[in-house]
Every structure is written in structure tokens, then in C-alpha cells.
Image: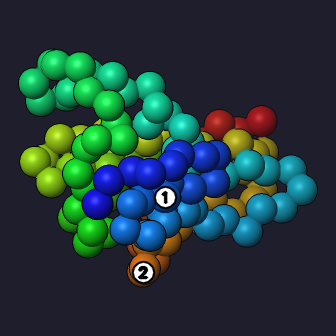
Amino acid sequence: MKIAKISNEMIKFDNGFELTYYHEQDCCENVYADFKFLKSYNLSTVTGKKINIYNIDFEEDIKKLIECITGQGFNMISKIGEKFFIPCYNEQNGYYSENLALILNQIIDITSCEKDDEV
């Protein structure tokens, strides 16, 4: 599957799948995955050649697609094993929940992946 659209809230793929995040936000926190960071990739992490992120073929199985990087975010892994990092953030005063989940036909808990940024 290839990326068709990237927004703040989701990544939409050409097969109709949508990768979204879920966190029950409270008034004084912001816990999220920074999907738009994918738009910054213009070089292959494998070959060093120029790429268009919209032409990369990704795994459809979320367990093969996602690799947690504890305290930072996660990698999205292409079919050829190329990794594209997506940072996750936990901006709050430490009082609120840091739970963060990704949804792509199934839910995977990535709570330990986001970077804490206590206010």
C-alpha cells in the first residue's frame, strides 16, 4: 500500500486504509503522532537517492508496518525494510494520561513511544 494523503490526524493509503492515532485529550495536554513529519523525507534511508514518500510501498500488517522507538516515536517500515521515523509527543504537566494508540484495522498501544515534554 502507498500513501495517498498525509494530514495532522492521519495517513491515508491508496487501498483505503487509514492510520490514525488515538488519545483521549484533556484540557491541558497534547499527546499525538506527528504524521506530517513524513513529508520531510526526500532521500532514501537505504540508497541515499531522492524519493517521493508517496511512491513508497508499505506493509499492510500493522505489526510489520510499525516499530516503536521508546520515548521518541515510531518507524513506519516499507516493504523493502526502509524505515521512516514519525515523532510522537506528550505535552503536559505530568498529571494527565500519556496513553497513545495507533489504529489501522487493529489497535496497537504505543504509549511508551512518545517523547515527554512536561510543562
Q: Position of residue 102 (x, y in %)?
A: 49, 66
Looking at the image, residue 82 lies above or below residue 2: above
| Of residues 15 and 86, the one drawn nearer to the viewer in this rendering | 15
Residue extending farthest to the bottom is 106
Mark 1–mark 2 distance (CA, rounded to whole Å): 15 Å
In the picture, residue 41 is in which quadrant? top left
35 horizontally vs 81: left or right: right
Q: Quadrant of the C terminus?
A: top right
Does residue 86 show up? Answer: yes
Disc number at residue 59? none
| Of residues 116 and 108, the one drawn nearer to the viewer in this rendering | 108
Query: Which of label 1 and label 2 is nearer to you?
Result: 1
Tell which circle, 1 or 2, labels the residue nearer the N-terminal end. Answer: 1
9 horizontally vs 108: left or right: right
Neighbourhood count class around disc 2 (C-alpha, 10 Å): few under 14, some 14–19, many 20 upward:
few
Q: Residue at x 23, y 51 (%)?
A: 57
Disc number at residue 106? 2
Which kind of residue does numbered mark 1 sit on?
Lys
- Residue with the mark numbered 1: 12
Identify the element where label 2 is drawn.
loop
